[in-house]
Amino acid sequence: MSETTFTTAVIEMRDASITALHDTSTVVVAGVNWTVQPGEFWVVAGQQRSGKTGLLLHAAGLMTPAQGSCRVFGCETANFGEAQIAERLRVGFVFAYGKLFNQLNVAENVALPLRYQNNLTADESARAVELILELFELTPYAGITPANLAANWRQRAALARALVLKPELLLLDNPLSGLGARHRQWLLKFLEQLSAGHEFFGGRPMTLVATTDDLHAWRHPKRKFAVLDAQVFSVLGTWDELEAARHPAVTELLAEPLETTI
Amino acid sequence: MLFGGTERKNFFDGKRVCYCYAMRGNLAKAFELTNTQVFRRAAVSKSYTDLLGRKLFLALLTVQGLGAFALITLAVILKKFGVARSVIQPRVRQEISRSGVALLPMFIFVALALGFVVVGQTVSALARVGQTAYLGSTMVIVIVRELGPLLTAMLVLARVGTANVIELGTARALGEVEALEALGIDPVHYLIVPRVIGMALGIFSLTIYLIIGALASGYLFAFLQDVPLTPGDYYKQIAEALTWLDFALLALKTMAFGFFIASVTCYHGLAQPLRLEDVSRVAVRAVTQGVIVCVLIDAVFIVLYLVT
């Protein structure tokens, strides 16, 4: 493995042990080897509590692996500090259920990273926030606090907040869960646009990683797939390779919901 | 294993200290050593010595955690002075308003009541020995040095401290702290620093208002009781009883109250991994410890007064 592979890859994990968020002494996934190249769109599938969130938090550099290494944009996440803030801000993170700040309304939530990182007053950031709210069709909800917002729109506001600083890598933790059909379609279409290069974000193809517990919705020839099962992270490749691999966990995640359950 | 654990730097390694604690490895990990929740959730012990040991251990862990948290907060205040000013300054103003200006009506009432109570009692006691001339100095000792600051601290703890724990505890339990970290925002800088500054300044100012109000209402009450004391004499007594040290220690003491009340409430709300159902229990604990901390600070200042 040469130095050049480190510098070009967006995420590079080598024998990384992923721990749980609230209990850093428990390893939930061991020995992760994973390379995400710029412009790729990865979908990581896994059942609930399989360590999807933990994996994403490690990939964002918010947690450091108990063992092994994890590099984001060629920078070891264990060394992430105040000086690496520029690298950290190249990563956008959308939490499951949004995790918006409850004390702030939607517009303030979206404006906060912009204002904090660029030292802007509310007035100075107003125009940029207005534009991004418009893009996400959130303008009518700008003054509403997250607790009074429907889950569909909360997820969208979280996406807007993660994208307001125009990151190069976007990590989404189970973004489709709890969304209505219309919002699922909108989100999938929007993510596809981001992956191809959205003009609002400079037209540059964005690297995306999304986790899911429902593989069907993510079927796409260009996306890459990986699965988390029984503490093991397995890279499966494209959709065709995924189907050919006949991984037991994948079979379960692809199960038709109505007939097989109950 | 190219870049294993050996290369990872120590928490206390140079300039990364507060960043490490507050942001990297997340708060849960940073406060792993002082995570008292683990002990609290353990099964109740059957032997008394075991129980006593656990309580003692918990107390020590809390002191350690609180101390570390207060130091980190202080370090972040100093280090990040001026960082993201456009966001932090309005937050500080908001906190000053919340733990200062908004409490003013209540404090006017408390000041009136305090003046009446203290003067009512002292006048009747001093009149019995014919020493009403000491009224001014008694007021200074009782109100300026002791009751004023302590009462202010307790009232602010009850009104703002509890709100702090619940707000921060809920935010912590709902994962908002991780969300802040993901956006490159230091949670200590954004959530704690404005609260600490706001409360220190709030308690300081409210104490001054409370003292002035209580001294004025005290005279009013003495006047109504026909104590032979002119406003000039009363003022002179008070001015003579006050030394420069009173002003300095009053400022220090009220600031210390504010800093530590905010630290205790924020520590309980934010520094430990919480579940939503823990929030109410943590709020009760924070208030109790806030009271204890205030009494301890007060004791330190009594010693200072006696020594000087």
Image (cartoon, helix red, strand yellow):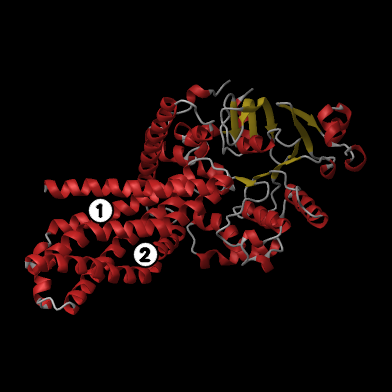
Disc 1 element: helix
Residue B201 in the image, given as x and y percentages of width and height: 33, 60
Position of A68 relative to B150 (above/below): above
Residue A186 in the image, given as x and y percentages of width and height: 79, 55
Please give the chain letter of the residue carrying mark 2: B
To which residue does mark 2 refer? B100
Furthest toward the front, the residue is: B128
Furthest toward the right, the residue is: A259
Residue at (29% x, 51% y) in the render: B256
Residue A32 in the image, given as x and y percentages of width and height: 67, 26
Identify the amino acid type marked 2. Gly
Compare residues B95 and B126 and report the one nearer the observer.
B126
- Whether residue A224 is visible to the viewer of this picture, yes or no, is yes
Position of A254 relative to B148 (above/below): above
Residue B254 in the image, given as x and y percentages of width and height: 28, 56
Compare residues A32 and A223 and report the one nearer the observer.
A32
Please give the chain letter of the residue carrying mark 1: B
Disc 2 element: loop
Task: Give the Cα distance between marks 2 and 1.
Answer: 16 Å
Q: Which mark is residue B253?
A: 1
- Whether residue B78 is visible to the viewer of this picture, yes or no, is no
Position of A240 relative to A177 (above/below): above
Residue at (79% x, 30% y) in the render: A236
Furthest toward the top, the residue is: B1
Identify the amino acid type marked 1. Lys
